[in-house]
Amino acid sequence: MASSNTLRKQFPLPEDLRVFLTVIRKESFIAAADDLGQSPAYVSKRIQILEKTLGTKLFHRSTRKIGLTEDGIHAQRWATQIIEDMDNFIDDLSQVSQTARGTLNICSTFGFGRNHVSKAISKLAANFPELEIRLEVTDRAVNLIDEGFDLEILVGDDLPQQHISKPLLSNQRILCASPDYLKSRGQLASLDDLSHHDCLVIKERSTPFGIWHLSDGDQEHSVKIQAPLSSNSGEIVLQWALDGRGIVLRSKWDVQKYLESGELIQVLPQYTQSANIWAVYPTRLSHSAKLRVCVEALQAYLQDQA
């Protein structure tokens, strides 16, 4: 069991050791103060604190010069070693923070994770072979800290306030249907018409079921819809839309090629839903090279594909 003296032991501050070594090098409290950009009173106070902490006198002082005591000579050797070790410690951590290596745990939604994040990570792994990357796709809300995730790629602007969020790409969800569906059920002239149509719903995370939140740029609208078909998979719902089963609210990112081919037609184009893509992480990018290069790679990949 540790003694009470051990428990009460105090250690010198690196700041005081640096002042101590500066005084030795400059051979003067005043010159040391000038070198440190501090006042002579500051230097004197730091030396007094150091002597009190060590329980010994470090300098012989006179009106003309200062000299080290025997304990001061021993303290100089140890102070030099400690400061060198501290500098090496900081340099080593700095080097680690600049090197992209180690394990990186990432999560994202099913569709976006499989179709887009996975491809970006494949390129990242090729460029940084020292990274070990785990990607988990899920439709549930995750707790980054408790579940050990370094990064989450989110679609939409419902962001956790306790973490850092970086926008990767601006994006919107739009309303689409197949030509066959619109031919059989008719075109839409207003949002009210949605209530008379079959809407295909993607049920994921905490998204309210049976309500679409849309914007015309000036005003937000909440629309109740009929949803004869729904799924937690965006890919399944998109396929239903292609099959002519109804109207889908889907990311422009995912339906653009079908709009270009004519397999889908955008309806009520003045109404959209924000679906921006975000990187969410608990640690600042400047503190982790592996996280920084991953976020940069994802942003570059998404912007290149947009």
Image (spheres, helix red, strand yellow):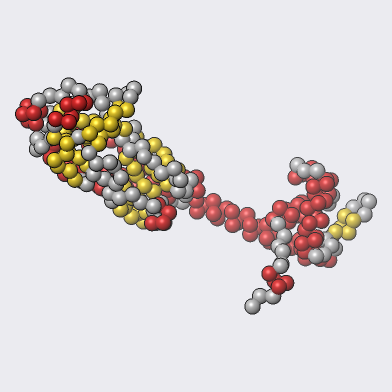
Q: Position of residue 190 (x, y in %)?
A: 20, 23
Can you see residue 172? no
Q: Is residue 246 above or below residue 51?
A: above
Quarter occupied by residue 158: top left
Can you see residue 48? yes
**Furthest residue to the right?**
63
Q: What residue is drawn where x is 71% and y is 53%? A: 15
Q: What residue is drawn where x is 90% and y is 52%? A: 65
Q: What residue is drawn where x is 75% and y is 42%? A: 37
Quadrant, the C terminus:
top left
Question: Total number of numbered labels?
Answer: 0
On the rendered structure, is 196 left or right of 215? Answer: left
Quarter occupied by residue 105: bottom left
Q: Is residue 51 above or below residue 253?
A: below
Q: Position of residue 303 (x, y in %)?
A: 33, 34
Q: Is residue 186 above or below residue 77?
A: above
On the rendered structure, is 256 left or right of 299? Answer: left
Query: In the image shown, does 30 or 112 lie closer to the viewer?
Result: 112
Q: What residue is drawn where x is 77% and y is 58%? A: 50
Query: In the image shown, does 17 or 163 lie closer to the viewer?
Result: 163
Query: In the image shown, does 305 or 155 lie closer to the viewer?
Result: 155
Q: Position of residue 251 (x, y in %)?
A: 25, 35
Quadrant, the N terminus:
bottom right
**Furthest residue to the bottom?**
1
Q: Position of residue 81 (x, y in %)?
A: 68, 61
